[in-house]
C-alpha cells in the first residue's frame, strides 16, 4: 500500500496478472475501486480498510471482462456507484455516471479528469486524479509497455500516450497488469544502451523474484525507460508495437 497527498492507494491482484486499484481519500473517507476483474480479492481488501466494506465508486477504464466482470457482485455487496465512458456504455455494466473526455467529476476532496485514451480499445479512458498524484491508466500505459492495439490504430495510441506524457512527472501510473518483467526484456532490444532501462530491468527482476509488484511506477520513470512512451512519431510507435506483438523473449 502506498499513499500520496492524503490518499491511500493499494494494488489489489485480480485473476492471473491483473491489478484493481483501491483508493481512499483520507480527508473524506471516500473509497473508490478501479477495474475489478473479479469480486473476491477486492471485497477482502475492502474488509481491511479503516471503514470495512465501504466502497463509494467503481471506476472503469474500458470494457474488457478482466476489468469489469467483478462489478455486479461488488455493487450488490457494497452499493457502490459505477463510472465509465459514455462511448462504451453499451458494453459496460450499468453506469451511474457516464463520462466523456474532458469531463471533471468530483471525487472526495479531489476530482477525476477524464482523458481520451483510445488504442487498446476505442472507448478507453484514463482517469487522472491530481489530488492523489495518480492516473488510472488501464491498459493504455504499462510499466515499460503499452497496450495491444485491439481496436485502435497506432495514431490513437500515440495520441493517448502524448496526453499521459503531459501530466506531472511525479504522477503515479496505476496500470491494469503485471507485465513489467516481460516488457523489460523487449524494451532492452529497443534501447540496449539505455542505462536507466538496464537499472530498471534489474530492479524488476529482483522485485518479481521476491514476489513483489513492480507497480505503481511514475511518469518520470516511464519517460526515461518506456520505449512506447519514448516513441516520438506514430511510425516509431507502430514499429515498436508490431515488434512487441511477435516478441518471444
Image: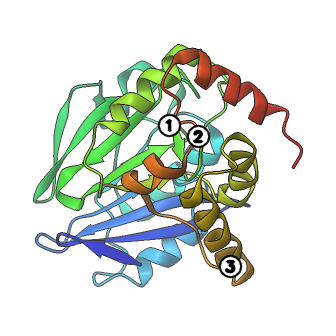
Q: Residue at x 74, y 61 (%)?
A: 16
Q: Which residue is mark 2?
A: 227
Q: How far apart are the alpha carbons under marks 2 and 1?
A: 5 Å
Q: Which residue is mark 1?
A: 230
Q: Which residue is mark 3?
A: 206
Q: Residue at x 13, y 54 (%)?
A: 110
Q: Residue at x 51, y 49 (%)?
A: 72
Q: How many marks?
A: 3
**Quadrant of the snapshot with the N terminus:** bottom left
Q: Nearer the viewer, mark 3 or mark 1?
A: 1
- Residue in the foreground of this view, choosing between 55 and 194: 194
Q: How far apart are the alpha carbons under marks 2 and 3?
A: 21 Å
Residue 105 as seen in the image, left or right of residue 196: left
Q: Residue at x 27, y 69 (%)?
A: 24
Whichever of labels 2 and 3 marks the residue nearer the N terminus, that label is 3
- Label pair 2/1, CB-CB below 8 angstroms: yes
Residue 115 as seen in the image, left or right of residue 215: left
Amino acid at each position: 500500500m502506498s499513499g500520496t497527498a492524503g490518499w491511500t492507494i493499494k494494488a489489489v491482484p485480480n485473476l492471473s496478472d491483473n491489478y484493481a486499484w483501491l483508493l481512499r481519500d483520507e480527508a473524506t473517507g471516500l473509497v473508490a475501486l478501479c477495474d475489478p476483474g473479479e469480486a473476491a480479492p477486492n471485497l477482502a481488501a475492502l474488509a481491511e480498510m479503516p471503514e470495512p466494506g465501504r466502497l463509494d465508486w467503481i471506476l472503469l477504464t474500458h470494457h474488457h471482462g478482466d476489468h469489469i466482470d467483478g462489478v455486479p457482485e461488488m455493487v450488490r455487496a457494497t452499493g457502490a456507484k459505477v463510472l465509465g465512458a459514455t462511448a462504451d456504455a453499451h458494453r459496460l455494466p450499468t453506469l451511474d455516471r457516464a463520462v466523456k473526455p474532458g469531463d471533471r467529476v468530483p471525487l472526495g476532496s479531489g476530482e477525476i479528469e477524464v482523458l481520451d485514451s483510445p488504442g487498446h480499445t476505442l472507448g478507453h479512458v484514463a482517469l487522472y486524479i491530481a489530488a492523489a498524484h495518480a492516473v488510472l491508466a488501464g491498459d493504455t500505459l504499462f510499466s515499460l509497455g503499452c497496450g495491444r492495439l485491439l481496436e485502435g490504430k497506432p495514431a490513437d495510441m500515440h495520441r493517448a500516450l502524448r496526453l499521459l506524457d503531459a501530466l506531472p512527472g511525479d504522477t503515479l501510473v496505476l496500470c491494469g497488469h503485471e507485465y513489467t518483467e516481460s516488457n523489460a526484456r523487449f524494451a532492452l532490444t529497443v534501447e540496449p544502451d539505455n542505462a536507466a532501462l538496464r537499472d530498471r530491468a534489474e530492479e524488476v527482476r529482483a522485485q518479481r523474484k521476491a514476489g513483489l509488484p513492480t507497480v505503481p511506477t511514475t511518469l518520470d520513470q516511464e519517460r526515461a525507460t518506456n520505449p512506447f512512451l519514448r516513441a516520438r512519431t506514430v511510425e516509431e510507435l507502430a514499429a515498436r508495437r508490431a515488434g512487441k506483438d511477435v516478441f518471444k523473449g
